Amino acid sequence: MSDVAKMRRLLGREDELASLTEDEMAVLVDGHSESISNESASQLQTLETALSAVDAEREASKPERTGRAVLRTLRAIGQSSMPAPAIVSELAGLLTTCSSLGPPRFRFQSRDAVTRNDNGNVVTFSRARASARTLELSAVVGEFGLVRWPSSETFIFGWNRSQASIGGLLRIPAHGEGTLLTVSVQLRVENVQFDGSVTLGTASNLLQPIQGDGNLPLRGGALGWCNAGLSLHGATGSARTTLQFVSEWVNRDGADSLDRAPGGVFTLSNTVALGPSTSLLSIVVDAEAFAGAEESEQLLGGFTAFECRVRPVQEVNGIWLPPARLHVARVDALLCEIPVLKESPGKARA
């Protein structure tokens, strides 16, 4: 049985989930991870295909033209994002009866993980704290200051990535046909100073790509981004929205970046139509960071660091990215009965 199937079966036993055991928490974490695994793989596959096409035409192109083609490819991935479901915009124009539900208490979290290079530097890092509603993650790859951060995945570029998530259960009161649930979460990029004080940061300060040697085949390219996601899982289905809230890319021929949280705050929303029997949902907030750089054994390769973690002072090195975390500052859940939907039996349900 797949991890997703185990998660759905568990959510179908809502009367038995008054308190979660460690095993039940693991089922919810693993089921969520499996449910979104194709999402990140698809992004990397798209990039691999596009970069491979550029590389195949490299011998017939001028180096500058190849470099610009690489930048266009990196930009396409660096600006990608999945918008919130269109149904959210339809609510304002409909006659509704809405009530706010108490926000879920986050009760389970992904497992901590860390890998290091031969010098003891962090290559990938993941830490989630459900009770504090915080996510921390890092992904570093490439070569900087004669130190190498090895890649765990390689195709054209070398790649490292990390993921962290927190989740909770939301109980749904009795409702009829034509009911929508909208869940919104506000996330904050927080800088945590060494004295423990917290200030609002900005997403662009989490990411630093550095170009490699411009004579490399793809002109020393480097790229990084981070996605944040909100998933609603039920016994019969799931709904998800994601936002790529920061990205940056560079090679010899140029550089660009995108920050969808310049003020350090952004919101994710998801709306689903509920069947009358739906009484329990799992709500999961996650983030996944990607770091990619062109690698070489002969020339200086590219380098990318995404750092969103509260680092101890002894780990501060020549790569200065401020100690930081993602904090789920607010969660809102709104249950709305919409008469129009009572006559639309074909509407998707959770």
Image (tube, grey):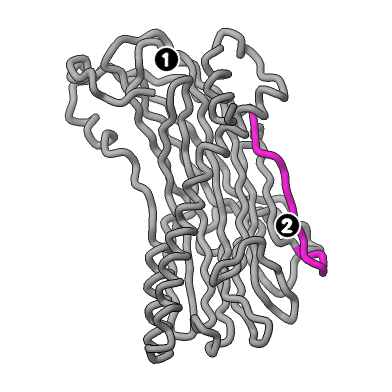
In this rendering, would 111 be left or right of 262?
Answer: right
The location of residue 327, given as percent across then percent down, is: 57, 43
Residue nearer the viewer, 193 or 104: 104
* Residue located beneath label 2 in the image: 311
Q: What's the distance in space between the residues labelled 2 and 1, CA to CA?
A: 42 Å
Which residue does the image show at 59% across and 31% down from the upper left? Answer: 3
The part of the chain drawn in magenta is 108-121
In this rendering, would 64 be left or right of 117?
Answer: left
Q: Residues within 10 Å of mark 1 (few under 14, many from 20)?
A: many
Give the quarter of the figure containing the C terminus.
Answer: top left
Q: Amino acid at mark 2?
A: Arg
Residue nearer the viewer, 308 or 241: 241
Q: Residues within 10 Å of mark 2 (few under 14, many from 20)?
A: some
The location of residue 196, given as percent across then percent down, is: 72, 50
* Residue located beneath label 1 in the image: 278
Callout 1 secondary element: loop
Which residue does the image show at 17% across and 16% down from the upper left? Answer: 343
Callout 2 secondary element: loop
The location of residue 95, given as percent across then percent down, is: 18, 21
In this rendering, the answer to whether 337 lies above or below 282 is: above
Locate residue 86: give its quadrant.
top left
Give the quarter of the figure containing the N terminus.
Answer: top right
Of labels 2 and 1, earlier in sequence is 1
Q: Are marks 2 and 1 in contact (CB under 8 Å)?
A: no
* Magenta stretch: includes residue 235: no
Question: Which label sits in the foreground, 2 or 1?
Answer: 1
In this rendering, the answer to whether 298 lies above or below 249 is: below
